[in-house]
Image (spheres, rainbow, N blue to C red):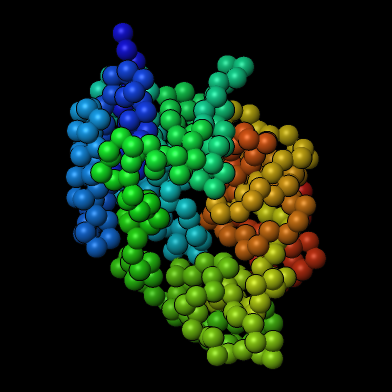
Amino acid sequence: MNKKIVVGMSGGVDSSVAALLIKQQDYDVIGLFMKNWEDDDSDEYCSSRQDLLDAVSVADSIGIPIEAVNFASEYKERVFGYFLREYQAGRTPNPDILCNSEIKFKAFLDHAIQLGADVIATGHYAQVREADGLFQLLKATDNSKDQSYFLYRLNQSQLGHAMFPLGKLLKSEVRTIAEQHGLSNYAKKDSTGICFIGERPFREFLNRYLPTSPGQMVTPEGKVVGQHIGLSFYTIGQRQGLGIGGAKDTSGEPWFVADKDMANNRLIVVQGHDHPALLSNRLTALDSHWISGTAPLLNHPYAAKTRYRQADAPCRITALDGNRCAFEFDQPQWAVTPGQSVVLYDGEICLGGAIIEQGYNLDISTLHHEEHRDHEDFS
């Protein structure tokens, strides 16, 4: 009896080719389109109606049934609520990571199993391998498209039910396959907006849900150089939208957000991309998740990413205490941001990761408004 596979189809080219490749292997395939956002679903930003039409067109083209399912309430409760709470606390969350663990590989997986699925498949660029009785999450062949960073919170059960048909393909190959098989969306632009919410003016969107709370923009030395509209609306490393372009010293360098003083409602800003206040040798992180179920080794040479678009950075884990951990890097990392994720790798294997609590610089820790804590001591 053929294995039954439910494929998440977003209307984009990646999930469409994933469905096509699985269908070509003579599996029993069903497409599933998820609608997860309803507050202002419009063609201008979300375009979910067009996405559904594209998904249905592809499903018809490759000869598989497709159904639409609405997870808007689950998304609002599990993902968007967390998203707003984190921004209100002054942190910068990554909703795509939570969306994967809570919606695509939980709500969607549960629904697929109710449909009789053995496995679910998605258009993610990643790979799964079983070794020594455990499922490993591996990087994709196309390093520029690898999405293992966004999948690091998956557990053994979720990975055991997951299939990533694009894991060994380059993005250019995926588009070529789509065009060769006459898929109508072969040239469709990739979505780069917030998971299921779409591309939109972010500050304007956030302002609908969070109040403004103006305050001072200050240098690390305390010099006032401008006014901010609310700490929730800024992120570490931000350059655009500060409104202090004319407030330059003799260096003439642009301004960047370096930190947030939540207690005094002050935004700490510095001049120059490579200002020491933007560089961190180490960080502490919370809510750690290890894919194998076992924590990594202390002081072992690994590599990590503190944001998606960066090369792997050599590092060591210097402390572990329950779900809290500390990382130390061989080279300083730029704009380490509370609320983002630090994701750990052993070669091509994604081991897991944690939510960044704070970045520190071993040489200039006094620039941080928070009390300096030794990275070996979590007490």
Q: In the image as oriented, which residue stretches furthest toward the front?
A: 180
Residue shown at 28%/19% (left/top)?
28
Q: In the image as oriented, which residue stretches furthest toward the top?
A: 1
**As displayed, is residue 174 above or below residue 116?**
below
Q: x, y percentage for residue 253?
A: 64, 82
Residue shown at 28%/29% (left/top)?
111
**As displayed, is residue 11 above or below residue 80?**
above
Count of numbered labels shown in the rendering: 0
Residue 119 visible in rendering: yes
Residue shown at 54%/37% (left/top)?
140
**As displayed, is residue 1 above or below residue 70?**
above
Question: Which of 203/252 is in front?
Answer: 252
Residue 151 visible in rendering: no
Residue 316 sits in quarter = top right
Residue shown at 45%/34% (left/top)?
166
Residue 268 sits in quarter = bottom right
Q: x, y percentage for residue 128?
A: 52, 28
Question: Which of 21/206 is in front?
Answer: 21
Q: x, y percentage for residue 98?
A: 43, 45
Question: Which of 126/229 is in front?
Answer: 126
The quadrant of the image that shows the N terminus is: top left
Q: x, y percentage for residue 269?
A: 60, 77
> Is residue 64 rendered to the left or right of residue 366?
left
> Is residue 3 rendered to the left or right of residue 233?
left
> Is residue 99 rendered to the left or right of residue 302?
left
